[in-house]
Amino acid sequence: MIADSRTIRLLMELRGQGVGDTAVLKALETTPRDLFVPELLNDQAWENTALPISCGQTISQPVVVALMTQRLALGARMRVLEIGTGSGYQAAILARLARRVYSIERHSELLRQARERFDRLRLHNITTMLGDGSRGWAEQAPFDRIVVTAAASTMPEALIEQLVPGGVMVAPVGEGAWNQKLYCVRRLDDTYESEAFLDVRFVPLVPDDEGS
Ligand code: SAH
């Protein structure tokens, strides 16, 4: 497949913003983002912007997806947990770089659409669950990597416990829309170390008892 000019422009922009990992760039190049956005916004699919999807949620900005994925430093044998399937775009990127992806979403309509996209792209290594992802997925734990794509107000420590020792989680943390940072967390044996690396704006991580 030869990338068209919009794709090339986006990839160059991502490089300029610190995405140097060629495997990550390749995953973004080969995942048709237009399939993950509402049809009306199709012409904006290859722009470096977040876009609205159903249920009042958003598909993240490509540079944020790329920088989060790069930070995860995925290996081909890894098992990854994602919280917040949304459109399925981030999961599709992960599926190209890891062995198996587990993804949890609390909106059934979003999950239905995301699964259709995974089938269409023949991404058979993604397992999804409808429910509250803030508790993680105990039956499938531990995970080599965890990525959270909705912002928790405090560090989601319950998820860190579902990482293998040495495992990495990337998660946005902060109150409100304007005060969030992306953290890269490494689990040590009984503790963890974390580093904030980017200012971001994600939709909130909603506990299940709060409804939509
Ligand atoms: N990764 C997505 C981005 C989705 S936006 C993509 O690539 O498109 C964040 C998503 O997290 C929303 O779909 C929202 O419904 C979901 N979400 C919020 N709180 C959640 C929770 N407690 N459990 C599971 N999903 C949650």
Image (cartoon, grey):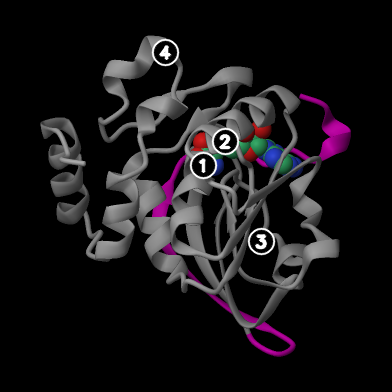
Mark nearer the N terminus (1 vs 3): 1
Mark nearer the N terminus (3 vs 2): 2
Mark nearer the N terminus (2 vs 4): 4
Image point (64%, 19%), residue name: 55
Q: Nearer the viewer, mark 4 or mark 1?
A: 1
The residue where tag 3 is placed is 155
Disc 1 element = loop
Disc 2 element = helix
Q: Position of residue 195 (x, y in %)?
A: 48, 72
Report whether residue 203 is seen. no
Image point (76%, 73%), residue name: 161
Q: Nearer the viewer, mark 2 or mark 4?
A: 2
The kind of residue on which mark 3 rests is Met
Q: CA distance from mark 2 to mark 1?
A: 5 Å
Q: Quadrant of residue 99?
A: bottom right
The residue where tag 4 is placed is 39
Decide which of 118, 187 is in the foreground and name it: 118
Decide which of 102, 199 is in the foreground and name it: 102
